[in-house]
Image (cartoon, grey):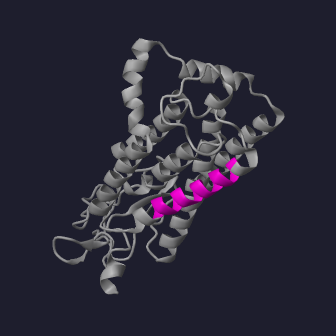
Amino acid sequence: MKSLESWWWPKRPARIPRARTSGLLAGVGAALFGVSAVLLKIGTLGWDKSLFRRLNEVPAAAASVLTPLSRLFLPAGIITAVALIVVYVLARNRSILPVAAGAAAAGVAWLLAHVAKAIADRPRPYQVMADAVLRQQPAHGTSFPSSHTAVTLAVAIALVPFLARPLAATGIGYAVLAGWSRMYLGVHYPLDVLGGAGIGMAAAGVILLALRTLLRRAGRAANGHNGTTEVQAPGAGADPRRGRKSRRSGPGRPLHRAKASEGQHVRWGRAGPPRRASSRWWR
């Protein structure tokens, strides 16, 4: 039991956005999906079909490059990318919590997307447009919203707190390109992708809120006043080289500073002067 618990909490501080930021993300996602659903309901779709044709019907020279690229965003490519990310977050954080967060985000996004599909019941582009180019096997289910976009974006955002910044940006970029590929392959309209993106953002925002609550209740939330707080799980303050708690975060080990008046030298402890929290969305 102790071994299982040690693999639950991440060994690195998680860069969890503040509750206001996560709530805003979820709200913007819900609004984006709502606007997309209203546009579909009232039938304002002329721009949607026109943009689809621009993204789907490309010159042969461009298609020779874009078609192999789009294969990276088919189910096999997405599964491969997810498997690589799982291995990375397990090795980097030595924790299954990021994997659980990604799985929860994927499950919520998938469920919401398929409920919306059943209600909207919109045909696929290649089923109603004679000039649509289908570049994959016919897809199952209805068109609105794009569940691939919803799930991919939800997972990418939910894993941001546990990834290095360059890899987090790469994950978001991969999710955006996954949405583009659904239009290029001929299985979704742009409005479907926007609706799926809204669901993904909303699902990820809810998961980030849950993560923040979980880690704060563990009693390891850092005090911060900016957009992001580094939340430290139980045991994450241990010094891996010496097997003891770090001087920076351990209880009973405040920074030592000699009393000094103006002009005198100030001596800090081994941890150095206190660091200011970053004000960026993630550190």
Which of the two residues, 240 or 69, is positioned nearer the viewer here? 69
14 left or right of 88? right
Quarter occupied by residue 233: bottom left
In magenta, the rendered stretch is 101-117
Where 143 sits versus 234, above or below? above
Quadrant in the picture for the N terminus: bottom left
Rendered location of residue 93, percent (x, y): 32, 63
Q: Tell me where residue 140 appears, x and y as whole percent.
A: 58, 44
Q: Is residue 44 above or below residue 122?
A: above
Residue 150 position within the rendered picture, expressed as x and y whole percent measured from the top left: 56, 47
Asked if the magenta segment contains residue 108, the reply would be yes
The one nearer the camera, 205 or 33, is 33
- Report the residue that reaches farthest toward the right: 42
Q: Is residue 124 left or right of residue 68?
A: right
Residue 16: x and y in percent read: 47, 59
Question: Which residue is more in the foreground, 97 or 60?
Answer: 60
Tell me what residue is drawn at x 44 percent, y 40 percent: 74
Q: Residue at x 48, y 53 (%)?
A: 155
The prevailing secondary structure element of the residues shown in magenta is helix
In the image: residue 138, left or right of residue 173? right
Q: Is residue 171 left or right of residue 190?
A: left
In the rendered image, residue 279 lying in the magenta stretch gets the answer: no
* Residue for point 78% across, 28% down: 44
Residue 72's quadrant in the figure? top left
Asked if 191 appears above or below 58 in the picture, the reply is below
